[in-house]
Amino acid sequence: MNGVENSDAPFMVELERFQGPLHLLLHLIREQEFDIFDIPIHNITDQFLVAVKGIGAGQLDSAGEFLEMAATLIRIKAQMLLPRPVETDGEDPRAELVRRLLEYEQIREITQRMERAEAERARRRPKGYLEDRPRPSPEELPLETTWEEVLAAAMGVKTPEPVDREHRVTPRTVSMEEKAILILDRLSRDSGVEFGSLLTSVQDDVQRMHGVMTFLAGLELSRRRRVHLRQTRPFHELWLYRRDEPGSGAGAVDDEFSDGIDDFAARVRAGALPAPTPEDQS
Amino acid sequence: MKPDQIVEAVLFASDAPLRPDEIARADESLDEDAVEGALARLKTFYLESERAFQLVEVAEGYQLLTEPRFAAYLDRLETVPRPSRLSGPALEALAIIAYRQPIGRVEVEYVRGVGSSGVIRTLQDRGLIDVVGRGEGLGRPLLYGTTNYFLQHFGFRSLDDLPRPDELPVILRDRTTPILPEEEEVQQDEVHQEDLQLDDVTVEEAR
């Protein structure tokens, strides 16, 4: 930073001439015919800082961008002083700046060409008296069409080729029938069982899957009138109770399922049972 | 009514370039081929009869425009509107958007090295650019692209008329040391899926 004071920068620049810090930097490099791939960062940083010092109070809007570039230059300068390990393919601290400068130089060139195209086009005039104006976008135009056009468009629609969709079926790791047997087994000994107690033997990491399947099994058994489900209050523990005389009370209604749980399990495996619908769970 | 006359009338009365399919909507007797034929005949006719206006291909369509050599005469009259010109910053931002579209404001600012929300708004107000989508990432930034009016303003037939980076005069010096990391260039290309890769700055010759 001290170098700024002593710097005898040969180039005085007026900042207003430049679109921004990249423009100024590019100008400094090109005017002095520095190699852009080997920017003398010390020299350039000093010159840049001198130029930035000239920013007046009236240009504070753009000052931030110039100061940011100055900070970048100083950072690069500092990095250049640090030894870089050669074998680790250490990137030149100037690389990103060089890339930006080259890109910006291209944009400058393109901008100048577009300016010439604009000037050339301005010498050709359309039929007069109308303001130069953009055309309304297609979305803003009212849709005007005929049935013939609609028909033609419809006929033009190609039916998509039927694609063989691949659908991967993941086997259930926990079966519902197993849980149904577990519930009935427990209820053959006790008249009621706490839902949570059915999960005590299950490891924590698979608890969720077992919990879901046990719950579904409970719902299914309830639907088939083999158990009662009781919950005294919302979010309280769920209890499952044996229904007296399985098959007898429900027999009339549930005749086709009265063969017992083995048949039920077989049907579930064969996929013959309908999935529980929301009203089953109500 | 001859098809050529219908086409001529439509061209005369329109204040913007028209595509052949648009002109064809003027009459049931016209289709795109008929219009193309009429346009070719009119073009030759205007050229051979040395009209002060000519049929010019612009913005993916056709428009009747005066010959450039008459501009000086037109400028003397108040009633002849003068085309507006863009400011330097606006042109610069527009050049970046034209080559990198679709592109967000932040990328434009990075290439220019200066804040650009003002010029982008101006360009949008003037109908030269428009929002063409939203980008990925934080806040789903608006992406801008050029409009058909952009082509009109610069007298381009299509975006292919933009100067190609590879036909620009070689302005880069010999690249002696591999300063630019290769991966970074590749990355940049992926980020900006442009047709004309500004990032493909080929560094070959000294000026």
Image (tube, coloured by chain):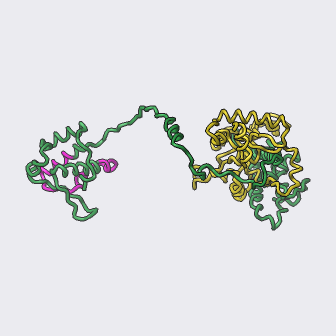
Of residues A189 and A5, the one nearer the viewer is A189
Q: Position of residue A16 (x, y in %)?
A: 84, 59
Residue sticking out furthest to the front: B1
Q: Position of residue A142 (x, y in %)?
A: 58, 51
Of residues B24 and B73, the one nearer the viewer is B24
Asked if the magenta segment contains residue A23, the reply would be no
Which residue is pictured at 55% across the width and 45% down the height?
Answer: A145
Q: Position of residue B97 (x, y in %)?
A: 70, 48
Asked if the magenta segment contains residue A206, the reply would be yes
Quarter of the image with the N terminus of chain B in it: top right
Q: Position of residue A176 (x, y in %)?
A: 24, 44
Q: Which residues are magenta?
A: A180-209
Residue A245: tell me if it is visible.
yes
Q: Chain in green?
A: A
Q: Is residue A175 left or right of residue B5?
A: left
Residue A2's quadrant in the figure?
A: bottom right
Q: Is residue A153 left or right of residue A279?
A: right
Of residues B178 and B185, the one nearer the viewer is B185
Q: Is residue A213 left or right of residue A78?
A: left
Vertical position of residue B108 compared to residue B201: above or below: below
Residue A40: tell me if it is visible.
no
